[in-house]
Image (tube, rainbow, N blue to C red):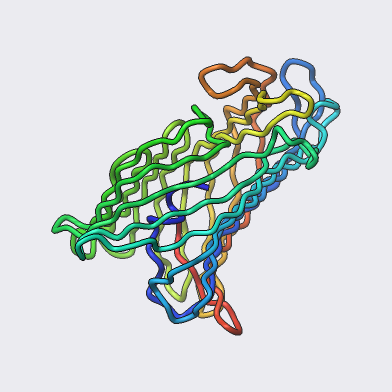
Amino acid sequence: MDESLLTRRWKADDFWAETYDRLYFTATGKLEETDEHIQFFHWDSDGRIKFSRKDLEPPVWLGYKANTLGVTSQADALNHTFADVAVAVALRVAAIDDDWTVQAAVGAGTANDGRWDNLHALYPTAAVDFAREMNIGTLHLGLSLDGNRNLFPRYPWPYLEVESRFGTRLDVLWGFPKTEFVFRPFKPIILSLQWSFVEDASARIEGDLGSGLSLFAEVSRHVDGFHLRHEERLREFFVSSAVELGFRWVTKYMDVSLTVGYAFGQRIFTGNDLLDRTPVSSVENLPFIGLTFPSTFWAAPFSSGVPR
């Protein structure tokens, strides 16, 4: 859980919560060093919940993430479910001279390898944000602590982000540790790029086919870390890159994407963070199928979401 709990704008809709779920299931492959079988099931979920449906600047809201990695393998050390689950509460603290808005969040989580009683897997999460509207967009300055961050997890990081819109064609979130671009060069094409320090990144192109259908292609890289049982601070990291092609269908009540793809460059490491890691194993390239559904929830049915 990072500073986006505070910096991400609430959508201009009438709703209780916004959620994002992505899951994918790989074919069975082999660990390259041992030829032992392995298969992955990922389910990454996060969202925000507010207590007033019509309030687009709520005084208090909740955030959560529940990222799970189910591993089926002949290697006993890997044959279980890994989970990174966290909850946080956020609030608007104050306004300074009508120019700056101060927000804060605090929470806790656990990143474990199936042992939910592992106290070493517990971690804190917190952030404080100073936001100001400027000619170039919205400026965010602050500090963010993520106790399961892939690099220096025990220390808060400063961040600086500027959210800008240039006409109807370009939206930019630029700064550190996260940068995002959404570019609409011409209808019906949308290009998006995302990068998050240290190793997470993605690039996507999407074309509108009409009637709520679109076709997209995406390439991405992602790192997940989980504490190992009986090892105190030692974590296991799963590094993976993927290329995928999919269809997206958006209606008044639904936003769902179905993809087929190929996971490559899959590596497993152990260490305290990504600067102090020891290779464990490599996994052969694997095809996968995936499903993504971002949503905003009303009092009754849910409305369609937008790409994150």
Residue 198 versus residue 164 in the image, above or below: above
What residue do we see at 69% from left, 19% from top?
281
Left/right of residue 207 with respect to residue 78 in the rendered view: left
- Identity of the residue drawn at 42% across and 78% down: 55
Give the image location of residue 167, x and y in percent: 18, 63
Residue drawn at 54 percent across, 34 percent down: 241
Q: Position of residue 22 (x, y in %)?
A: 60, 54
Q: Would residue 294 be visible to someone looking at this image?
A: no
How many marks on residues? 0
Q: Is residue 54 visible?
A: yes
Q: Position of residue 143 (x, y in %)?
A: 38, 42
How far from the left and from the top, in percent, is residue 76? Answer: 85, 27
Closest to the observer, 238 or 89: 89
163 vs 35, left or right, is: left
Residue at 58% of width from left, 83% of height from top?
299
Q: Nearer the viewer, residue 219 or 195?
A: 195
- Specify the quadrant of the image occupied by residue 82: top right
